[in-house]
Amino acid sequence: MNVGAGRPFRSPRAILFDLDGTLVDSAADLTAAVNELLASRDLPALRLDQVKAMIGGGIRKLVERAFAASGTPLLGSALEEANRDMAPIYRRHLTGLTRLMPGIREVLTHFHLNGKAMGVVTNKPQLATREILLHFGLTEYLGAIVGGDAVTYLKPAPDALLLALDQLGVEPYDALMVGDSGADVGAARAAGMPVVLLRGGYSQIPVEDLGADLVCDSLLDLPSAMQRLQDAA
């Protein structure tokens, strides 16, 4: 684990989680959706590792990156049309190939039993986010679910985090953000929150280099790591 120098750690009242790459591995479903969209335009399919490197910033950004990678970059009205076409395709590829990341249910149960309020903040659309969480039976743990279309600005802006904390009735200094990317760090810093990053997500930059307060191998390590930090504070 790595701890940001000079940042005191306190036990949070609330924990906010990113979704893709943090709670779920959705790369295979996103790849299937992207390739269905590309096929509709007679463009070649992209590999899983290619699409995985494009995740982050919402579905619109994923579509833009996918067409650029296919050698057919889109701008303006052409990009808007592709995004409209992507919407029904994406809704068909939400849970078929998506899997929970290791330890999710155990960790959420642990924090629930210890009285932590929890929420999900993601750049994924709100209805898609809720459908995924319902599919995996995770909504019972969550007091707030905020998707990218519920706010004006996506992460790394703090809007989604602040909205979720308002719904939970918790101030940023009493909360913790858990994610897997630089966008999660940026959003947490802008909101005035400490942030933990997990290895094994979708960041193309080593998570140790993103400036988090703590880096863990997986969510299973988070409770004990947080306790060690609290004891050392």
Image (cartoon, rainbow, N blue to C red):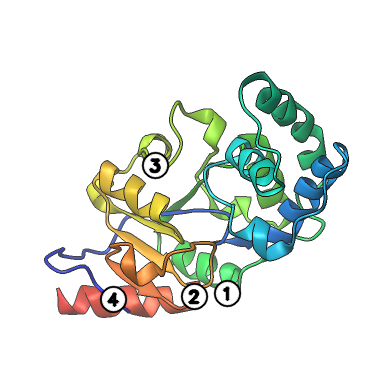
Amino acid carrying mark 4 in the image:
Asn
Which amino acid does the dot numbered 3 rest on? Leu
Which badge, 1 or 2, is on the more N-terminal residue?
1
Q: Quadrant of the C terminus?
A: bottom left
Would you name the residue on which mark 3 appears?
A: 161
Q: Which of marks 4 and 3 is nearer the N terminus?
A: 4
The residue pinned by badge 1 equals 103
Q: Earlier in the sequence, mark 2 or mark 4?
A: 4
Closer to the camera in the image, 23 or 164: 23
Residue depicted at 62% across the width and 38% down the height: 64
Element type where label 3 sits in the image: helix
The residue wearing badge 4 is 2
Query: In whole angstroms, how far apart are the C-alphas of marks 1 and 4?
Result: 20 Å
**Residue 120: x, y in percent?**
51, 48
- Choose the circle earlier in sequence order: 1 or 4: 4
Q: Nearer the viewer, mark 4 or mark 3?
A: 4
The local crowd at label 2, few if under 14, some if 14 to 19, many if 20 or more residues have their Cα within 10 Å, is some
- Which residue shows up at 65% across the image and 37% down it? 73
Q: In this view, does 32 lie to the left or right of 107?
A: right
- Mark 1–mark 2 contact, CB under 8 Å? yes
Instruction: Give the side of residue 13 with respect to residue 27, left or right.
Output: left
C-alpha separation, residue under disc 3 versus residue under disc 2: 21 Å
Q: Mark 2 points at which residue?
A: 218
From where the camera sits, is residue 154 visible? yes
